[in-house]
Image: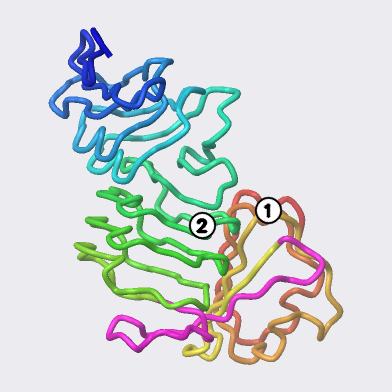
Amino acid sequence: MEGYTVYSSTDDGILIDNHESPKKILMKYPSGKKETTYEIPSDITTIGKSAFESSVSLTSMNIPTGISTIEDKAFKGCKSMTKFTVTEGQLYFTVEEDVLFDINKKILIQYPAKKETVKYYLPDTITTIKSYSFDTVEKLETVILPETITTIESTSFDSCEKLKNFYYLSENTFNEDIISNCHSLTIIKVNKNYKGEESEKIKERLTPNVIEGTTVRYFYDESDDCEDLTIYRTGEMKDFEETTQPWNSFKDVMKKVTIEEGVQSIGKNAFNSYSQLNEVILPLSITTI
């Protein structure tokens, strides 16, 4: 087409691909730019592969309504990123706790590298974690992946220097190349039904469970004879009879209970007559005991 330009550059140096008009791809944002934010033009439909890679000055990113596709590694190496947002009316992507997902929260696209959280529970809607989605994450020490996970792409967790604990509650196998350059990683804990091969780092088995009649979940380490119990997710714990707690068979060996932020109550008789219990960690979210 006469006068049609396949590639163009904006006034601020952003490379745009117009060859599939009306689709417009943001191909490359100059990584050396010093601005902390960038407003994606309203006519852009796609954020291209590695488009913002190594843009270390960016601290936040809003996904406008025109964006329908975000290609692989779009935000790899954005070490200063603290949050993602989406414009109201965006039909393809959403954000929860500053983390970027597809609209159905089945695909985790990008976790902000400079997010302050030290422990992160992935939503239990997630099935896929994209490559480099946890790239150069600065603060994260513990990550808990739900039973719903079916796909973890290679190098999903790269250069997370403080990542120590990797909890994998799915029964599906994973390749060890999903984790690279995470030099503080000491424990990978997996579902007791995990079907993968043994690894030197896989030291403990987990049994994840739902507390029936609630949205609250718990898991324990079978290798520790259930000395440690973790209760998590958002919601209220129901009341129990003296012997109907789902962890009752371990009452004589349980030493520590950790209740995570989001749990709002501790049910009646939850830990009644647990003779070895000597430490209980409570979150600020607890309102009823």
Q: Which amino acid does label 1 sit on?
A: Ile
Residue at left offset 70%, top offset 71%? 210
Mark 1–mark 2 distance (CA, rounded to whole Å) = 18 Å
Q: Mark 1 highlights which residue?
A: 286
Q: How crowded is mark 1: few (under 14 residues within 10 Å), some or many (20 or more)?
A: some
Q: Mark 2 highlights which residue?
A: 121
Q: Give the range drawn in magenta.
A: 189-215
Q: What element carries label 2?
A: strand
| Rendered location of residue 239, percent (x, y) | 84, 69
| Rendered location of residue 73, percent (x, y) | 29, 45
In the displayed structure image, the side of residue 123 where residue 119 appears, left or right: left
In the displayed structure image, the side of residue 122 where residue 241 appears, left or right: right
What label does residue 19 carry, if any?
Answer: none
Q: Is residue 119 magenta?
A: no
In the displayed structure image, the side of residue 197 where residue 181 appears, left or right: left
Q: Which amino acid does label 2 sit on?
A: Tyr
| Rendered location of residue 253, percent (x, y) | 59, 90
